[in-house]
Image: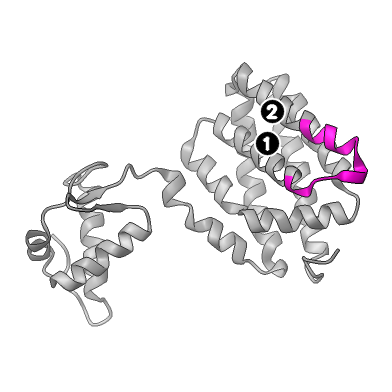
Amino acid sequence: MSEAPGPSRSQTDVVIQGIKDMLTQGTLAPGSRLPIEKDLAVMLGVSRGSLREGVRALATLGVLETRQGDGTYVTALDPAVLLSPLSFLADLQQPAHAADLLAVRRVLEAESVALAATRLSEEQLTTLGGILAGIDAELDNESDMDLEKFINADTAFHRTIAEAAGNPPLAALIDSLVGRTFRARLWRAISNRGSVRETQAEHHAILDELVRRDPERARIRMSVHLLGVEQFSAAHADEDPEAR
C-alpha cells in the first residue's frame, strides 16, 4: 500500500503517507476506526514504535484521535480543525511580514463577502448589525474604551461574514490567517492612532452592501477596508507592537 522507505524518508513519514493514502483511497473515512496496532504496522511495513509516532503526529494535526481503551479513529476532518495550525503561523509572524499575510486575507475575504451577499440569512444580518451596534456604543464612551471588546467584535464580524459565504474551508482559512495575538496587535496599533472610528465606518459600509445584497459593491468595500489595514500594518512594521 505504501512506498518502501528511502534514505531520506523516515518510517514516521511512511506511516503518515500510508494513512493519508488510506483516506484518499476510501479505505478509511471520517469516523472510521483504524485497524489494531499490530495489523496496521504490518500493513504499512513499519515498526510499532514508528506507527505510534506517526499516529501521534496525525493526532496533533487533527486527523486522528485516540480514545482510551477503544482504539484510534479518524476525526470528522473538520476544515476548521485541520487548518487551525495556520493561526499559530499568523501569531508568530514578525511585524515586518504581517502585511504579506494580510494581503492573502484580503483576497480571500473579498471573495467571501461577495458570496455572503447572496447567501446571508436575515438572522445573520441582524447579528452583524448587533455586533457593530456594540462597537458604536463603546465609541460613544471614548473615555472608557475596552480594546478587548473591539477585538472580540471585529473577530465576530468577519467570522460571521465568512461563515455566511457557505464554504467551510474558505471560512476556516480566513479565521486562521488572523490569529488572536495578531488581531490584538493590529487593534492596539489602530486604537493608539485614533483610527477606530474610521475602521468602524468601513465595517458599516460593508454591512450596508450586504443589506443591499450587492456582491460586487460588498467585495469592493471589503477590499478597501482590508487594504487599509494591510497598508497600515506595513507602514508601522518597524514600531513596537506593544507601544502605548
Asked if the residue at tag 1 contacts the one at tag 2, i.e. Cβ–Cβ closer than 8 Å, the answer is yes
Q: Quadrant of residue 55?
A: bottom left
Image quarter hosting the N terminus = bottom left
Which quadrant: the C terminus?
bottom right
Name the kind of residue labelled 2 in the image: Leu
The residue pinned by badge 1 equals: 157
| Rendered image: mark on residue 128 | 2
The answer to whether 99 appears left or right of 176 in the picture is right
Q: Is 186 displayed left or right of 73 in the figure?
A: right
Q: Residue furthest bottom?
A: 7
The residue located at (82%, 42%) in the rendering is: 199
The residue depicted at 63 percent of the width and 41 percent of the height is 109
Q: Residues within 10 Å of mark 2 (few under 14, many from 20)?
A: many
Query: Which corner quadrant of the image does residue 99 belong to?
Result: bottom right
Q: CA distance from mark 2 to mark 1?
A: 6 Å
Q: Residue at x 53, y 47 (%)?
A: 173
The residue shown at (8%, 63%) is: 38
Q: Earlier in the sequence, mark 2 or mark 1?
A: 2
| Scheme of colours in the image | one colour
144 part of magenta stretch: yes
What's the magenta region? Answer: 134-148
Q: Is 240 left, or right, of 64 in this rendering? A: right
Q: Up-down: is 65 above or below 78?
A: below
Q: Amino acid at mark 1?
A: Phe
Left or right placement of residue 160 versus residue 20 in this view: right
Q: Secondary structure at mark 1?
A: helix
Q: Position of residue 128 (x, y in %)?
A: 69, 28
Q: Main secondary structure of the magenta part?
A: helix
Position in image of residue 16 (x %, y %) = 26, 63
Query: Where residue 36 sits in the image (x, y, percent)?
Result: 10, 56
Q: Secondary structure at mark 2?
A: helix
